[in-house]
Amino acid sequence: MTDVQPFYPRRILSSTTTGDLLDGISRSLAAGSKAILIDFEQVMFMDSTGLSALVITLKRVREANARLALCRLNGQALMVLEHSGMDKVFEIYDTPADFEQALANQSNELLTN
């Protein structure tokens, strides 16, 4: 099973906070991470810069042949994704455990095929 590298942005995902998130994810990918999870449990607000950072992250993750998921989206952050149509682009899970289960299921399917 693939180890999941979690990220926990806090409070606001905007131009003042996305740099740290992008840097951390880039470092994780460079270290060979193949599963990135951004947990939105503590995020209360996300603006268009935050959304752009997620799109950049998705591109970087795909270029690294890795997998990106978002979880525990709620309120305004979820609304931004839904209104932009990006909720159809990202893998979104209710909990980190749901993403880990999806990874385990995928691994099991690969083993049986």
Image (cartoon, rainbow, N blue to C red):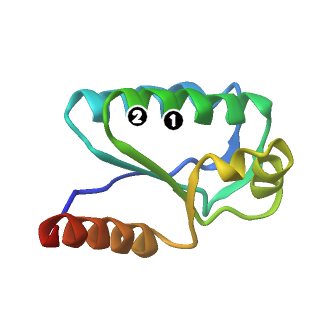
Residue 104 horizontal/vertical position (percent)? 27, 71
Residue located 68% across and 28% down the image: 52
Residue that label 1 marks: 58
Residue 86 horizontal/vertical position (percent)? 71, 44
Looking at the image, is 37 positioned above or below residue 60? below
Residue 97 horizontal/vertical position (percent)? 40, 75
Q: CA distance from mark 2 to mark 1?
A: 5 Å
**Residue 80 image label:** none
Please state which amino acid type lies under the numbered disc 1.
Leu
Looking at the image, is 61 positioned above or below residue 82? above
Q: Secondary structure at mark 1?
A: helix
**Dots 2 and 1: beta carbons under 8 Å?**
yes
Specify few, some or many for label 2: CA neighbours under 10 Å numbering under 14, 14-19, or 20 or more.
many
Q: Secondary structure at mark 2?
A: helix
**Residue 61 image label:** 2
Residue 14 horizontal/vertical position (percent)? 71, 33
* Residue in the foreground of this view, choosing between 57 and 15: 57
* Residue in the foreground of this view, choosing between 43 and 105: 105
Q: Quadrant of residue 92?
A: bottom right
- Looking at the rendering, in which quadrant would you find the N terminus? bottom left
> In the orientation shown, which residue stands out farthest toward the front?
113
Specify few, some or many for label 1: CA neighbours under 10 Å numbering under 14, 14-19, or 20 or more.
some
> In the orientation shown, which residue stands out farthest toward the right?
83
Looking at the image, is 91 positioned above or below residue 31? below
